[in-house]
Every structure is written in C-alpha cells, then in structure tokens.
Amino acid sequence: MQSIKDYNTFTKIELINKGWSTDQKYYIETTDNEKRLLRIASISEYDKKKAEFEIMKQVAALGVTMSQPLDFGICHNGESVYSLFTWCEGQDAGDVLSQLTEIEQYELGVSSGQMLKLIHSISAPLNQEDWEIRFNRKTNYKIEKYKACPIKLDGDEQIMHYIENNRYLLSDRPQCLHHGDYHVGNMIISPHNTLSIIDFNRYDFGDPWEEFNRIVWSAEASPHFATGQLNGYFDGKPPIEFFKLLAFYISSNMLSSIYWAIPFGEKEVITMKKQAKNVLSWFNHMNNPVPIWYLEKINR
C-alpha cells in the first residue's frame, strides 16, 4: 500500500468484510482525523475501475450525497488498482429504518428517489444498443436458465405469463446511467438522519425505470421508505405505465434470482424463494401492477 497517495498519513487501516464485491475494502483514518474508504482490485480491472471512478465524479458533481471520489491509481508494484473515497458516516439503511418513525422512513425514501433522479440525468452513450432488443435478449436468457434450473419457484407460471404478455412495454424506452444496485443495502443513514449512497461498482446504462428492480429489498425493509422513493423520484404518485414496467422488471429478476442463489448455498435459495412469494403477494399473483406495499396516503 505504500505507493498509495498520502499513505504516510494513514493511522488506521481496517479490512471491511461486507458486501458481494470482489474488491478488497478498507476503512481508513488519517493524521488529520479524516475517514476514508479504500478499494483495491486486480490490475486486470484497471479500465473498469477507472471508468467507475470517472462516473462517480460525474455523479458527485450533481450533488448526490455519496462516497466522494478522491484519488485513483496503481499500487502493489503494478499488480493492483486502488480507488480512494470519503467515508459515509452512519449505519446501513436496512438496519436503521425500523428504528425510525414511519414519517422519517418516508422522508428518507423521498430523498433516495430525488438522488436517483439526479443519477438518471446522466445520459447513456449514443451508441447504446436499443433497449427493447437488449432486454428481450436478456429476458430470454433468464427464462432459458430458469427452465434448466433444478429448483423452481411457486407461481412461476404466473411470473412467466406476465413477462410474455408485457414485452411490448420495452418499446421506445429511454436509457441513462444506472447506479446498478439501488436499494437500502447500499445506502447509509447518518447519526443526523441523512441518507448517503454507496457502492457504484455495478453501474451500467439502461431504462431508468429498470433501476427500480431492486426496490423489493427496500419494500421488505420499509414500505414507507419504498413509497417515498417512488414519490420522490416522480414528484408524486408514479404513472400506471411505470407500475406495469416495475412488475415486468421484478418478474424478470425473480427468475434469475433462483439460479443465481444456488452456488451460494441453501440459505440464499430460501431467501430468494421467500422473496418470490412476497412478490406474487404484492402484485396479487401478477394481476395488479401496483404493489400492495405502495401507500396511497401518508399520514404526516
């Protein structure tokens, strides 16, 4: 690590064993009492990590509360690439929300929706493949993989029926920057009840509404937060067209979640089967695109 800029100011280096990323992550304290997040990856990921760092600089410039990118470079005698960020003080949103009032949960959700809107203001590259073609191909792949999977979800016929009947919704969709994994697991709530966004390492480009496919995790943690996220993003209740596509994207995700979970063991498989059961309940077995966790009225 000695080749990392300002390494000589580091007074504390603590390994972080959290998350799904293959990056090595460290909590850093400096001689100036500053707190930092250090991420280290293989040099083979240099181009990917450089692009991620530049994207985060663009997002930070929009005013999104997040880990601010500070420095990027090569370390470990050319074998690794590092990225240095500010540290977001607080706790995982998924762990804190239940301790807050419903109105506080809702307001934090609104904040998350407003920040997501800012992220989505960054356009996709002009040479991006047409969304309908791209996502239909992705959906076909998920269906094939699911059918070959030895474990099946209860109600999978309803999920696949909804997908086949609603592919037309993919037509003429705009594309923009995605955070890539936008849910309470990648959000921090500070001691002052403010929200920060972390972990942009799965960023990509696509239909802005597809970004909500991870809202299932937020809705399980807090319906008020999830409702606030939608209302904050749309500055009011979302249109019915959004809810139809939301059900489509979540359905597609459900199929891939089960074969994704198998290599991680029985615990993850059980989690995904439970989530699929919740999804079917939320959407009345795919007969109502507005999920039951969406709160039409908020008592404030």
Image (spheres, rainbow, N blue to C red):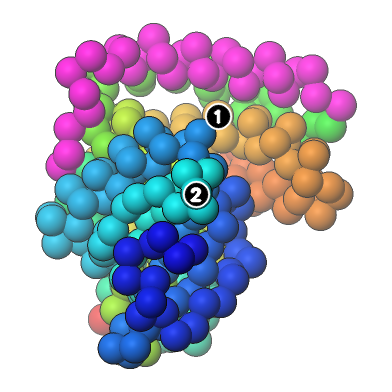
Q: Quadrant of residue 115?
A: bottom left
Q: As shown in the figure, which amino acid type bears the numbered disc 1?
A: Ser
What residue is rendered at 32% in x and 31% in y? 205
What residue is rendered at 41% in x and 60% in y? 3
Q: Give the magenta range.
A: 121-150
- Label 1: which secondary element: helix
x then y, percent, for residue 193: 32, 84
Residue named by callout 2: 77
Q: Residues within 10 Å of mark 1 (few under 14, many from 20)?
A: many
Precedes in sequence: disc 2 or disc 1: 2
Q: Does the stretch in magenta take in 171?
A: no
Q: Which corner quadrant holds the C terminus? A: bottom left
What residue is rendered at 22% in x and 28% in y? 124
x then y, percent, for residue 13: 52, 77
Residue 11 visible in the current orientation: yes
Residue named by callout 1: 252
Q: As shown in the figure, which amino acid type bears the numbered disc 2?
A: Asn
**Residue placed most toward the observer, 143 or 234:** 143
User: Is residue 237 positioned above or below 151 on the image?
Assistant: below
Work out how far the residue at label 2 is from the one at label 1, CA to CA, in angstroms.
43 Å
x then y, percent, for residue 165: 49, 16
